[in-house]
Every structure is written in C-alpha cells, then in structure tokens.
Image: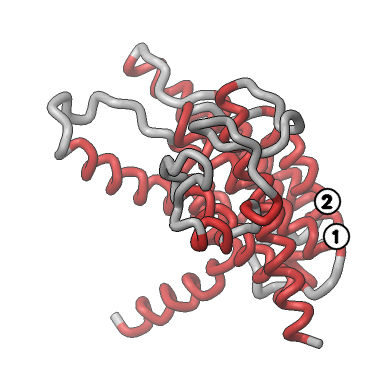
Amino acid sequence: MDLIFAAFAFGTGAIIGSFLNVVIHRYPREESIVFPASRCPSCSTPIRPWDNIPIASWILLRGRCRSCREPIAVRYPLVELANALFWLAAFLHLGPTPGALLVATATSMTVVLVFIDAEIQILPDVIDLPGILLGMLIGWLGLGTVHPQLVLAESILDSIFGAMFGAGLLLAVALTYRLVRKVEGMGMGDVKMMAMIGAICGWGAILPVVFLASVTGALIGVAIAMRRSEGLQFALPFGVFLGFALLAVVFFGRALEAWYFRLLMSA
C-alpha cells in the first residue's frame, strides 16, 4: 500500500509538472494556458496523447519532436521530474492529508516562479499573491507544529508575521539600494515572493532563506561575471535563488540546522 501511495503521489506530481511546463512556456509569451492543446514549440503540431506522457515521452523520443525532429528542451522532463519528487516528498512527510496537498501545491507554484523569473525576470502576481494565501492556510493548520520535520509556519500568526517580515526586509533592501545607487536593484515581485515565502515557512525561516539565496546568487553572479566583458553590470533574477532557497529550507532545513550545530560543537 505504501508503494502504491508513493507511486500515485509521484505520478500526480509528474502530471502536474507537465501542466507547469505549459504555464512556464506560455505565460512569458502572453498565450492562453488552456487553449490550444499542447503543441510543439517549433512546428506547432499538436502533441499526441502517447507523446505527452510526463518524463517517459521525452526519453522515448530522445528529446525531439516526432513531427519536425527539432530538439525539445531538457527543461520539460526536468520540471516534471522535480515536481514529481517534491509531491512525493510532501506526501511521504505529511501523508494523504489536505496539508500535504497545500505543501505540494506551494512547491509547484515555486517551480513556476523560478522558471518564469529566469526567462523574463518577472514574478507574476497571479502566482505569488495566491501563494501568500496558501501560506496562511499552512499556518492556520499549524503544519510546522504537527510535522516539525519540515520547516513550515506553525500558526496563522506565524504566517502573518512571516509574510510581513519577509516583504518588509526585501522592501527595505530595495529602497536602500535605490536611494544609494539611484537605480532599481530589486523589483516588487521579489518583495511579494518573499511575503509568500514568509507565509509558508513562518518568520523564523526568513533569514535562512534570504542568506541561502544571497550566497548562491552571489556565487552564480561571480561565475557569470567572469565570463562576461561587462563584469558585474547585469541583472540577476533573485526570485530564482529565493525559490531554490525556499525548497531547500522547507525540505532540508532541519537537516541543515543539525549539521550546522554539529559543526559548531566540533569547532
């Protein structure tokens, strides 16, 4: 029964991941996410049902469209696999409960925000604002208390304070940067996404998320700058790193915390 349940959670996550790919591809192009049905981005040929099986079809087709043989981006199976694994992790931790569905949905919304921000450097309100409400539901259910192995809001007040602290922190950073440098350094989309993160994880996770996102963003930024002639004068989508940091803290925060304290004790 556990194996069947795990397979169901993984399969559902993969199917949802296939829909996320539609959103990720069409939103930046201002296309409907409902109509028309899935089609090849290169030749616009409708994708047959047997060629639209999450993960498996891309492998069987060797990453190419059956009609025009143009390459299909590896992003498609990666999104499906990642979403499937996050859904599996959520349901293994929380069981077949409404809370598991909320957490799994939060991970899916985060995946979409990461990929859209990476492409067009926009974090859509249609995703992050409902994400704040979803985080409030997580706090209202007290999932961080019921399931302490995951880093989640422990109460509705934890969610509210988390959203306010997260948004306020990034807003202060954005306003300070604009005041000092006289240019826009961080968009309001990042502020709203941080409110979503705070609502989901609670106020205590804000600083770890921001720290992890800042460190990884700085490392990636330096690596990119070393390959570009203009140095550090380029835009880096911070929402990408916030999304990865959120997922890391939610699912691995307790393990990272334990590792950090063991490191301190052994120093």
* 107 horizontally vs 67: left or right: right
Task: Please state the horizontal and vertical placement of residue 77, each as a whole percent of the image.
Answer: 53, 55
Q: Residue at x 15, y 39 (%)?
A: 226
Q: Is residue 162 visible?
A: no
The structure residue drawn at horizontal position 37% and vertical position 33%, both measured from the top left corner, is 236
Q: Quadrant of the N terminus?
A: bottom right
Query: Within 10 angstroms of label 2, few (less than 14), some, or many (20 or more) residues?
Result: many
Q: Residue at x 76, y 86 (%)?
A: 2
The residue closer to the viewer here, 121 or 148, is 121
The image quarter containing residue 99 is bottom right
Marks 1/2: CA–CA distance: 6 Å
Viewer-proximal residue among 252 and 78: 78
Amino acid type, mark 1 = Leu
Q: Residue at x 61, y 30 (%)?
A: 26
Q: Which structural element holds mark 2?
A: helix
Residue occupied by mark 1: 141
Asked if the residue under mark 2 is in contact with the one under mark 1, i.e. CB atoms within 8 Å, the reply is: yes
Q: Toward the viewer: 143 or 222?
A: 222
The image shows residue 130 at horizontal and vertical percentages of 76, 37
Q: Is residue 217 above or below residue 250?
A: above
Q: Could you tell me residue 31's position as x and y percent?
A: 65, 23
